[in-house]
């Protein structure tokens, strides 16, 4: 079942050219309050940017506990800092970090502002293909050498691709920040992109597509997005199709990397035992050649929707996903929406879990979740049940959604869900490994 919201202002058919750095700053301000404006190096609140040869024009700093309730203990040593390139956003990546006073590790990540929706249909899956390929080695280091260097620290290095960005990150013990940054800069800035490696990873990705096609959970959400965004890049699978993956040529990937893997499409984020000034200096040097890029120009989806998609297979369960157009990722109402979705299907006490599982015994797993993009959003519900009970499941879910939000407008009735959602955020941001990806601009999902 696919439906549309009555919200007219979430649809924008015009092209959008967004600053990746502005998206990061907006996310910082959403969490920590107004960061102010960039100021000359050495004069920023809480420290400022690097001096001398630093690529930073200045730093924006704020205590990570800003906005805490009156009387709550202050985490005075936890500081968020944002450093901007000296000669404008195309001169190099912006750097954002959160120093966590008790952390014994550091996570460093590089976000590239290009994803599945930014690809030409002929090279659909190129972002994900590059995510695989960049770990196959550089001009200076083999894939094995990179793996051994990370393993020697006891750390990890990985990546993921979304519809609007691709992220590469490393988590290492405190004191190994320089190594993590150097490895990330090497694989992102100087990948070998060897023809033999392209063919190897092509087969790996085709196998990944086969595995996904065998997983009903993945298939049902693929169908849902195709129905919510018919004919639009947001409706395409991030991995691409078998046809596109099979035909992407090495020169396609080389051109894609050279065009998009440049500032202002690069943002470096770090959390944990971070030395912000050292990170800014190293990033400026390491990415000096990855400049003068541009952000993707994106066109929003139309209001067209497809009511339902269905695939029949001999499986033990019927997997059902419902979806509605939601809010774009920078909509000021997104936090209120997240709270409402949490009440609907975000936890063990949610209305869907209590009704569908606890009262009716219709499903083992049921949940609701939001997703926000530059010019659109999605609210989805998922559940799986025995095929003969699928119609009953749909009636029960539809009834609960029709009653949503279920507690009226009385503020006191939202107190418990709000504190529960806040607790989830606290747990999610407790470790450097979570805090670093947390600065991603599409952090709604």
Image: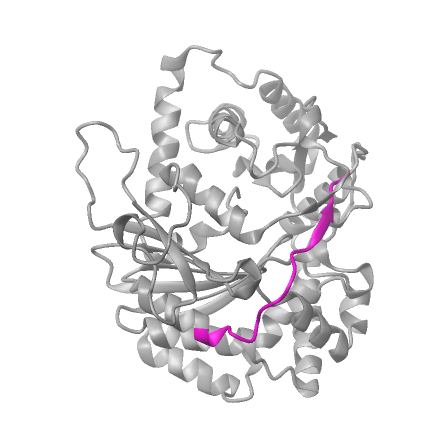
Q: Nearer the viewer, residue 87 or 121?
A: 87
Main SS of the magenta part reads loop
Image side of residue 201 versus residue 349, left or right: right
Work out whether residue 314 can be spotted: no
Q: Position of residue 431 (x, y in %)?
A: 32, 54
Work out whether residue 8 can be spotted: yes
Q: How many marks?
A: 0
Q: Which residues are magenta?
A: 285-301
Q: Position of residue 129 (x, y in %)?
A: 66, 69
Say above or below: 33 vs 154.
above
Task: Identify the coloring.
Answer: one colour
Rendered residue at 34%/70% (across/down): 52
Rendered residue at 48%/42% (across/down): 26
Say above or below: 40 vs 396.
below
Q: Nearer the viewer, residue 128 or 269?
A: 269
Q: Nearer the viewer, residue 96 or 45?
A: 45
* 160 is within the stretch colored magenta: no
């Amino acid at each position: 079942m696919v439906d549309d919201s009555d919200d007219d202002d979430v649809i924008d058919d015009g092209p959008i050219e967004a600053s990746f750095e502005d998206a990061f700053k907006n996310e910082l301000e959403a969490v920590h309050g107004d960061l102010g404006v960039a100021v000359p190096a050495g004069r920023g609140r809480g420290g400022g940017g690097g001096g001398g040869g630093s690529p930073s024009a200045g730093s924006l700093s704020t205590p990570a506990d800003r906005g805490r309730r009156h009387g709550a203990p202050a985490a005075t040593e936890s500081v968020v800092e944002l450093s901007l390139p000296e000669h404008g956003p195309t001169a190099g990546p912006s750097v954002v970090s959160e120093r966590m006073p008790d952390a014994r590790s550091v996570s460093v990540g590089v976000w590239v502002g290009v994803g599945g929706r930014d690809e030409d249909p002929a090279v659909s899956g190129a972002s994900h293909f590059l995510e695989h390929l960049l770990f196959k080695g550089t001009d200076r280091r083999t894939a094995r050498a990179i793996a051994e260097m990370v393993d020697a620290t006891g750390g990890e290095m990985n990546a993921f691709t979304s519809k609007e960005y691709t992220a590469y990150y490393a988590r290492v013990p405190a004191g190994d920040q320089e190594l993590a940054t150097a490895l990330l800069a090497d694989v992102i800035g100087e990948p070998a992109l060897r023809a033999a490696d392209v063919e190897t990873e092509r087969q790996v990705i085709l196998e990944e597509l086969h595995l996904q096609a065998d997983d009903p959970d993945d298939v049902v959400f693929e169908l849902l997005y195709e129905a919510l965004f018919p004919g639009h890049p947001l409706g395409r699978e991030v991995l691409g199709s078998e046809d596109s993956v099979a035909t992407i040529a090495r020169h396609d990937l080389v051109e894609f990397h050279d065009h998009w893997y440049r500032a202002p499409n690069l943002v470096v984020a770090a959390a944990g035992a971070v030395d912000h000034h050292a990170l800014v200096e190293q990033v400026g040097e390491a990415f000096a050649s990855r400049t003068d890029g541009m952000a993707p120009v994106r066109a929003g989806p139309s209001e067209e929707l497809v009511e339902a998609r269905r695939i029949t297979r001999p499986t033990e369960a019927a997997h059902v996903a419902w979806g509605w157009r939601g809010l774009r990722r920078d909509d000021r109402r997104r936090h209120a929406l997240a709270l409402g979705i949490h009440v609907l299907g975000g936890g063990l006490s949610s209305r869907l879990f209590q009704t569908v599982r606890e009262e009716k015994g219709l499903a083992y797993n049921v949940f609701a979740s939001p997703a926000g993009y530059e010019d659109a959003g999605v609210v989805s519900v998922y559940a799986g049940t025995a095929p003969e009970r699928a119609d009953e499941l749909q009636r029960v879910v539809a009834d609960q959604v029709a009653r949503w939000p279920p507690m009226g407008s009385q503020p006191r009735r939202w107190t418990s869900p709000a504190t529960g959602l806040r607790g989830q955020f606290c747990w999610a941001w407790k470790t450097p490994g979570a805090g670093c990806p947390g600065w991603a601009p599409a952090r709604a999902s």
